[in-house]
Image (tube, rainbow, N blue to C red):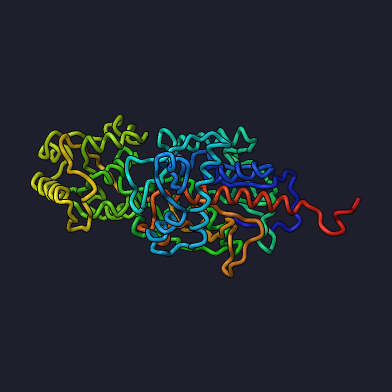
Amino acid sequence: MTVVPAADRRFEVSMPVVVIGAGAGGLVAALAARAAGVDVLVLERDPVPRGSTAMSAGLIPAPATRWQAKTGIVDTAELFAADILAKAHREPDAAVVMHLAETIGPTLEWLADAHGLPFDVITEFLYPGHSTYRMHGLPTRSGVELIERLCAAADAAGVMIMTDARVDTLFADPDGRVRGIGVVRPDDSRDEVGCGALVLACSGYGGNPAQVSRHIPALADALFFGHIGNQGDALVWGEALGAATRHLSGHQGHGAIAHPHGIQITWATITQGGVQVNRDGRRFADETRGYSEQAAAIVAQPGGIAFTIFDERIGAVARGFEDFRQAEAAGAVLTAATIPDLAERIGVPVANLTATLCAAEAAQCAKAIDAFGRDFSRAPPLVPPYRAVRVTGALLHTQGGLVVDTDARVLRNDGTALPNLFAVGGAACGVSGSQASGYLSGNGLLSAVGLGRTAGRVAACAVKAERVPHGDDAHAG
């Protein structure tokens, strides 16, 4: 990945706004730019747009939405912002947090009204760190549906998407203004495209082992359960242009990837009362802290393996998610009528598992806080038949990145904005701070979709403003 001086380079083709990456952030940015009246080109390195979005559950947190109001949920942007900052130990930029909290609800309603995305709010369970029910999703609760609907909306809106197009070069002026990009095709042919504004929506560096080892050593040997295209391109380009970076150790982990099936298991299996044990049949952490921080806890267990244990009541909730249904179909979800039977099926010492589950049941019956600090007051005890999934911890995507302002403009170290460069989603420094524990459920798509709309609108307006003649030029000809 390189940045080359633009000098007097001329581009045969030029677009007002170019977006690198056709995940949720890039497609929402493109839709917003089109809505503002400018043409957009989206460049995607894969044959089909998917990215990290398709590997997620497609859930987006938002406060004060009409879907919440319909179900009687009272929520505000201020409460949502407070939850984000509390989970992230008050590390994120409070102005960016508040901007996202205020704009994400209207953004989801715009996607529903203008582009037909049928969101609703999940009320079956509360995600860790959220004060109320505010997670919104599509009917299948899958990122695949989200990306497919956004692609369809982009096509209907006249967004040009070029696939199998890997950007490897930016052409820029000495002041950091990007004049164009270089694209390489699978057959090694090349194209160069000029741009009025550039939106980096190519996510973070989770697929780059060297950068993961440098910034997140605890997960250096963990499964990467994100998109392999997340190679840190935005970081390389941004730093070459003089951009500031922040919270590069921040990330979203996940403590429930079915192994060896490679299917994400919804955390409802935990929030509704399930537990995790290691190969010794013992619990090892407060699972309800969050699925992100649980990833490293599992990686530290013998063999990097744990077992998520729940019951049919919880399984019925989990079946609302496409990924869980796929896990059942693949045979990843085991069933056992008794604790000894369960111990045999998952291969752990029966005495240890019996003691562990009996202790959890006692805490649940007493509505008590256990030795790990887990509050068992919100869920009833597990009852047979039991369910279990063999899982490992994984890195899903990184949360640190290029520093942006509330207009999604990329900032230099002195706080000034680069002339026409924007970053969204994993390419930007998100709102999770520097630690895995700072990740509040949904922060990834919040940053992608929320900053995506902002970047598209602001980029389009900036390009249009540059076209308007000023002073004597307004009367020329």
Side of 348 where 151 appears, left or right:
right
Image quadrant where one finds the N terminus: bottom right
Q: Is residue 219 visible?
A: yes
User: Is 82 drawn above or below residue 41 in the view shown?
Assistant: below
Give the x, y percent position of residue 413. Answer: 56, 68
Residue drawn where x is 27% and y is 34% of the image: 316
Give the x, y percent position of residue 460. Answer: 67, 49
The one nearer the camera, 341 or 29, is: 29
The one nearer the camera, 92 or 258, is: 92
User: Is 387 drawn above or below residue 15 in the view shown?
Assistant: above
The one nearer the camera, 23 or 305, is: 23
**Residue farthest to the bottom?**
414
The one nearer the camera, 63 or 206, is: 63
Residue 37, image quadrant: top right
User: Is 408 drawn above or below residue 269 in the view shown?
Assistant: below
Residue 114, image quadrant: top right
Q: Is residue 45 visible?
A: no
Side of 109 where 381 appears, left or right:
left
**Residue farthest to the right?**
477
**Residue farthest to the left?**
351
